[in-house]
Amino acid sequence: MTDMLTPVLSDNWDTERPWTLESYEQTGGYAALDTALGMGQDAVIDLVKESGLRGRGGAGFPTGMKWGFIPQGDGKPHYLVVNADESEPGTCKDIPLMMASPHTLVEGVIISSYAIRANHAFIYVRGEVLHVVRRLQRAVQEAYLAGHLGQNIHGSGYDLELTVHAGAGAYICGEETALLDSLEGRRGQPRLRPPFPAVAGLYAAPTVINNVESIASVPCIVRNGAEWFGSMGTEKSKGMTLYSLSGHVKRPGQYEAPLGITLRQLLDLAGGVREGHELKFWTPGGSSTPILTAEHLDVPLDYEGVGAAGSMLGTKALQIFDETTCVVRAVLRWTEFYKHESCGKCTPCREGTWWLVQTLARLEQGKGSEQDLENLLDTCDNILGRSFCALGDGATSPITSSIQHFRDEYVRHLTEGGCPFDHAASTLFAPAGATA
Amino acid sequence: MTLNHDPALDAGSGRLPEETLRELRAIGARYPQARSALLPMLHLVQSVEGRVTSRGIEACADILGISAAEVSGVATFYTMYKRRPVGDYHVGVCTNTLCAVMGGDEIFERLKGHLDVGNDETTDDGKVTLEHLECNAACDYAPVMMVNWEFMDNMTPQSATQLVDDLRAGTEVRSTRGARICTWREAERVLAGFPDDRADEGPAAGPASLVGLGIARERGWKAPEGRTAAGTTSGTPGATAAAEQADTSRAESETKVEQSPTDTVGGKGDETSTGEGKKR
Ligand SMILES: Cc1cc2nc3c(=O)[nH]c(=O)nc-3n(C[C@H](O)[C@H](O)[C@H](O)COP(=O)(O)O)c2cc1C
Ligand code: SF4
Ligand code: FES
């Protein structure tokens, strides 16, 4: 049995100035890099495969397998691109990681780039997080000066350049192929697949794109081995991960635990839903994952468990809403987000999200009819599986799942001619005694 | 070629300063293909010009050997690039669902009234540009505001109005988990890849980032023993001190959570119960 919480990635966040190279090296940092350089590239890929590490950016694709798709000996340059765009509503784990311990990511980048035989890597970080950009810039600069980056790293003959690249505000740039277009200096719009990035990615060269947390998990695997990693988590979802609790909980924040912990357990640690209130609905992994309810408190939060409950583990962004929250208002706001962020490339998403907002807004104001619910579901049907990228699919998740769990509440808006909730009661600074 | 060109906006005509052109070219050198530099180049244009100007667009096009229309097409795609002048302080309020529900809507409404501006507008004194934001990856600190893309966590309508008053008065403001607030143009320069010297300012993490870690420390929970490279997980020399520090930050976070409701009761926050929060 492992402990309930297993800080690994977050383990040094409470040390003295953990963002500095000096501090990171004092807690064992950059030792895994030496180990990796001594193992050889293929052995590192095999180790990551064996560990069972799955991508932490939302889809859960096995990381080692992804690396294995990179053609070897093809004479082309290879690239590693770290997806630090973190913009999926609710998701807030990569930013604190890079703020507190950017060297964990940088060490992961070097090891991973070495494994896939890349000589240039990029960290594509969303632009709206100035201090994180500063910490990354500083960490990269320190790593160059210490010989962890640049020519002939640690005397191994291996060379790597690492560029920190700040985005400019666009959720779609988190989608990996849109990210590549953006990194090439274009509008961030998804690319047709195939070819997959592993074959033709950045500058049409073989490219691995991984989430921050995925890459940051590599050094500890190299240091402690695949078996150690697999001793945490469940059979198919191995290792520890950052769960992010937000919203109506007593102690929102980051909780690093083995995959498979339940929301009931996490809420327990977090002191429960805020005083005097109860859980109404929650997202397991950001706004693009279908919402769940109190019925699902004991669902194991791993890829299989949440999938079986009809949702997705996603980014493990657990947004908690209590009974004061109007689900229609929440869903409308998310839908406005998708409409705003739709890149416009394909019709189902561009037009569909527009219609969804119109219909939802009418319902929220109590002006529509019950037929509108069917219209919503129809529109969702026309988007899901028919859009060019997963943004469109994600846009339908809150709508279909909320109608499934809270159809009555939509109807109440109609029968009461407007929103039956007092929005002030949901706020953190709600006047004492306010109720829904 | 249409450029969305509004001549009234283009105060400065002619070329950008030589120094800026040199720096724009230098950004290109960071990448295997220069075109990759376009996003940081536009950040640099904003830091020099206070917005994306036509001459800035033309300079980028010139350097990269692409058309001004192409550059313009990129600039309009991304929300951080502004065609209208931005104030010294870009003040953002997250109104994505979670923050909105937790009070972001009320904060945004309050600021619009207090500053007498609408979304994406600048105060008459040119100090503050107000904008509502999408999720800024800080939901565990909701309701969240950003000033020049620095975190301002756990905000209330009062702390928000105090914040913009301080900014307009020129009082030094610090991010709740970042550096002293610089100007928007200075921030844009950092985003263009020209670091300032503020990386060491501020804490490693805010209280919410350390909540789980603090609980683990308190209960003695750890990841399984790994191969012990010089003090990796357990038994670090500073572990006790660190645990103490975590305890304090957790205590602080608890008081903060407890304080925020009482803070507002009887204060201006009461207005929110009059239904202000309902309209949008
Ligand atoms: C609209 C959209 C936004 C996304 N945003 C992110 C993001 O911000 N960060 C991220 O790592 N992955 C994001 N993804 C997933 C990426 O496309 C990709 O699957 C991921 O970066 C792969 O890394 P991983 O295998 O390490 O998880 C997004 C996907 C979509 C469709
Ligand atoms: S689904 Fe939406 S975001 Fe994705 S390509 Fe189509 S329009 Fe663009
Ligand atoms: S919803 Fe506001 S920071 Fe995420």
Image: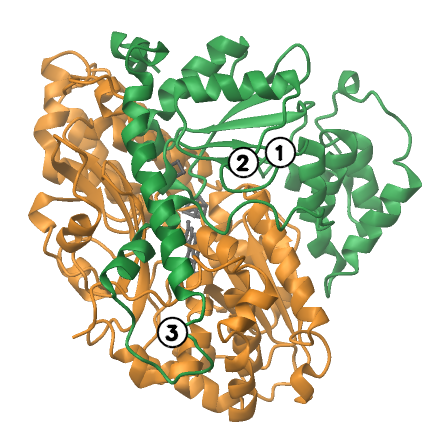
- Residue designated by label 2: B175
Q: Amino acid at mark 2?
A: Ser
In front of the other: A226 or B133: A226
Confirm or reject: label 2 Cβ below 8 Å from ligand 3: no
Work out whether residue A387 can be spotted: no
Residues at discs 1 and 2 both on one chain: yes
- CA separation, marks 2 and 3? 33 Å
Image height of B181 relative to A19, above or below? above
From the top left corner, tell me how far across and down residue A68 is, in percent: 45, 82
Q: Is residue B63 left or right of residue A260?
A: right
Percent x, y of residue A372:
19, 26
Left or right side of B82 for A13: left
2 or 3: mark nearer the eye: 3
Q: Amino acid at mark 1?
A: Ile
Residue at mark 3: chain: B
* Residue carrying label 3: B235
Q: Chain of mark 2?
A: B
Q: Which mark is residue B181?
A: 1
Chain A in the picture: what colour? Answer: orange
- Chain B tint in image: green
Residue A72 occupies quadrant = bottom right
